[in-house]
Image (spheres, rainbow, N blue to C red):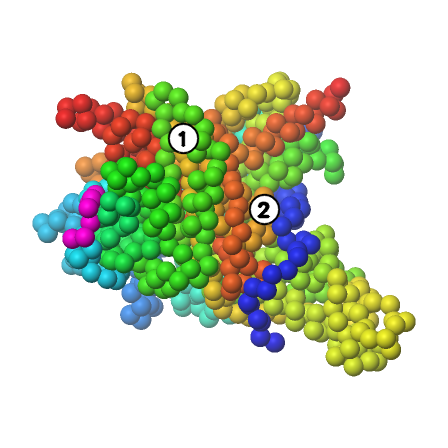
Amino acid sequence: MASLPVSTTINSDDVEYLCHADESLLDVLRDRLGLMGAKEGCGTGDCGACSVIMDGRVVCSCLVLGAEAEGRNIETIEGMADGNTLHPLQQKFIEHAALQCGICTPGFLMAAKALLDTNPDPSEEEIRFWLAGNLCRCTGYDKIVRAVADAAIVMREERA
Amino acid sequence: MSLDTTYQGRNFRSVGTRPLRPDGVDKVTGRARYGADFNMPGQLVARILRSPHAHARIVRIDTSRAEALKGVKAVVTAADLPDLTEGDQGLFNTLENCMARTEVLYDGHAVAAVAAIDARVAKQALKLIEVEYEVLPHVTDVDMAARPDAPKANGTAPNIAKQTEFGHGDVDAGFARADVIVERSFLTEQTHQGYIEPHACVASCNSDGTAEMWVCTQGHFVYRQTCASLLGLDVSKLRVTSSEIGGGFGGKTHVWAEPVALALSRKAGRPVKLVMSREEVFRASGPTSATSIDVKIGATKDGRITAATAHLRYSNGPYADGWAEMGAMTSFACYDLENVKTVGSEILVNRPKVAAYRAPSAPMAAFAVESAVDELAQKLGIDPVEFRIQNAASEGTRSSYGPVYGPIGIGPTLEAAKAHDHMKAPLGPNQGRGMACGFWFNFGGQTCTDLNINADGTVTLAVGTVDVGGSRASLSLIAAEELGIDYKDVKAVVADTATLGYNDMTDGSRGTFSSSMATISAARNAIEVMRQRAALIWDIPVEDIDWEDGHAVARGENYGNLPPLSVADIAAEAGTTGGPIAGHSEIVADGAGVSFATHICDVEVDPETGSTRIKRYTVIQDAGKAVHPSYVEGQYQGGAAQGIGWALNEEYVYGEDGRLQNPGFLDYRIPVCSDLPMIDTQILEIPNPNHPYGVRGVGETSIVPPLAAIANAISNAVGVRMTHIPMSPPRILAALDREKAG
């Protein structure tokens, strides 16, 4: 099968790659670019473990074709921290013990970032419905919701 | 030095605090490496061909066309995994479950596997493998399978494969004394552990007979043993490294496809990566039993239970394991009963081989028993908490499964429930409140730990129990506590099978319990060495040296001018006082204290749709001693959430054709964030007398009460006793319709 050349932006860097027409963005990230932070939990868009942000919207990278990234702006978990400074969401997830096994964590962080980038002061209900596309089997979501709410406070203070 | 494990009480300085976990940054930055996140040079990609039939004889397999495909490097069938099990039935079952031999026994049973240069070629190759099946009659339902005329699920073995019995006293005499008797039958459907990370491994067999495997597992030492036995390798020649694990809940205590990956690597002469798809995870790994349970309980008017019986039928998949046996043992473990009898029947069906799922078998038994207990309390007009308090087991009670209890938490969790705000909160229309109790044995097992004192006085703790939910933080706290140093100076790692002695699985809630016991023992051994080194440094008798707050301290007036030596001071002199300093420990961690919990739940049921919403949920559980309370709460909340999914939604749906109809997260729907409320927790600490710090396992008990607590809540909300789990909207509507029809 012929490969397609793709030019895109990933975590602010210009990236070029070749991929097959039917290859998912998740497979491109993991297998071609070595960005393993996005996880495949289902491959059918049901678990959110592969969530990345594309042009400001959270998407399941398993449901996006690698070729569709052409000209887009992609954010992945690998680009969330600023060097050694964690993003407030990352810091709060650790502080609140909002992860146990941690396999869902990159996806949750991406989804929560997309939420707080557009809604800096979400209610508990808004957090719960926004994150409903991300499955976590360990925590019962309690500490995740608290971590997101707490990170929102920090981010509002940083902006003020 | 042998370890005195007796609980002696102490004022903790590290244990009970909530420091940041050592693997936190890796896990929030995407750097943590899970099963599928590892690659080797020259690695091939494996795919497995699975049976489309529930039960069939394999007439012929032709792999020649697949082998001829460009890019295919190996194809294996059962012929490549010869039977080396030498009469060990359990091991043979594992082998046959990895790769069907003469018959396929369930939809999804592996029949062949390929390794190719990439996934595309591997998938193409699967389509070129020709398998001729002779379809055989099948049975997937637990009650149907128990009937005498049912098709046999596996060869000539009877479907009722094994029966076990527990109890004491005279139940007939007990029922004769009862004023009120409740007798009910209950059903629960099959559920999956639902870990988000599919099974994954990279296997590499070398031409010199050595092999390596990277794998997500709850027990890499056990995987090594099993795989070495099945492949005919020396245990020492197979090195297994456990990846970070993306959830297991019991489902990663069993070998599934790892021997197949090794066989492919051996045949191809190259490393092989094998990652299951979600569909394969559902069809071919893990589920817990479906059950059918009859319960009978009698009590006097004043609320004393006089007799209790239960007959529990648990589906096992095609192989007889002990799942009903554990259900029979746990059924009435919460209560002090004079007359009790339970019978467990292991039922063979053409479904995947059942695997452990968090307190395996206990939630279904608790659903049946705690529902009947609730109904009995209602009939007697006694408050359900009071009724349970009146009949609760306590220290000295002979349990329904045999042993006599030490100090236990069932009474205290019930008293805490009685006093909890939640019990007094008002309920709205269509709402109901339910509560239920749960028990789990907990387990200790073989454990080995190394504690190395580094040159700068920091500590590396190597443990062999896989960290499934924060145990590296807990064990670092334990080492810091015992040594008297700071948490930040301890780094805990999970060692691979070549660098540490054997460890049992992380199962039975044993990770923190058993490895903390071994860590305390290793720390005490290291302290002993450091006292001896201090004696050499100071040139005084070791008997005159105490260990206090992380320092060697010379005791007595003669040594008044000797400043205490820190771990770093002593480590700095290691080269001249006898070499590296370490403490080791190899133990069987006996004395895992049994665990009890009480849960309270409020639900609201929509009478038009039959849909249930959890309005409020409270978990009260005995932890013995909560080492890192945040992760103890996490275990309580996570177990409750899994129980809520089981109670309301999750079930394997099989068609008439014996095939699984919902092998995906869309149709097998686990709770999502918007389904749940906050889950309140209350940690009780009734010290385990058999652990130096009083620790009990905390991981599993939290999944035991939810099925019953929610069923009791729904029954109270709608006025109809719910007897079939999951209580999905159609089942609730049907129950309401039946009630209306009278």
Q: Looking at this view, is B582 or A24 the one in front?
A: B582
Which of the 4 image quadrants contains residue B154?
bottom left
**Residue B627 seen in this snapshot:** yes
The answer to if B331 sits in the magenta stretch is no
Residue A115 position, x and y percent, is 59, 22
For the point 42% across and 45% down, which residue is it? B414
Query: Which numbered circle lies on residue B629?
Result: 2
Q: Is B113 left, or right, of B221 in this rendering? A: left
Nearest to N terminus: mark 1 or mark 2 = 1
Q: Which chain is home to disc 1?
A: B
Which quarter of the picture shows residue B1?
Answer: bottom right
Q: CA distance from mark 1 to mark 2?
A: 25 Å
The quadrant in which the C terminus of chain B is found is: top left
| Residue toward you, B163 or B211 | B163
Q: Which residue is mark 1?
A: B602
- Helix or strand or loop: what does disc 2 sit on? helix
Circle 1 crowding by C-alpha within 10 Å: few under 14, some 14–19, many from 20: many
Region rendered in magenta: B176-182
Q: Residue at x 23, y 53 (%)?
A: B307
Image quadrant in which you'd find residue B577: bottom right
Residue B692: x and y, percent?
Answer: 58, 64
| Chain ID of residue with mark 2 | B
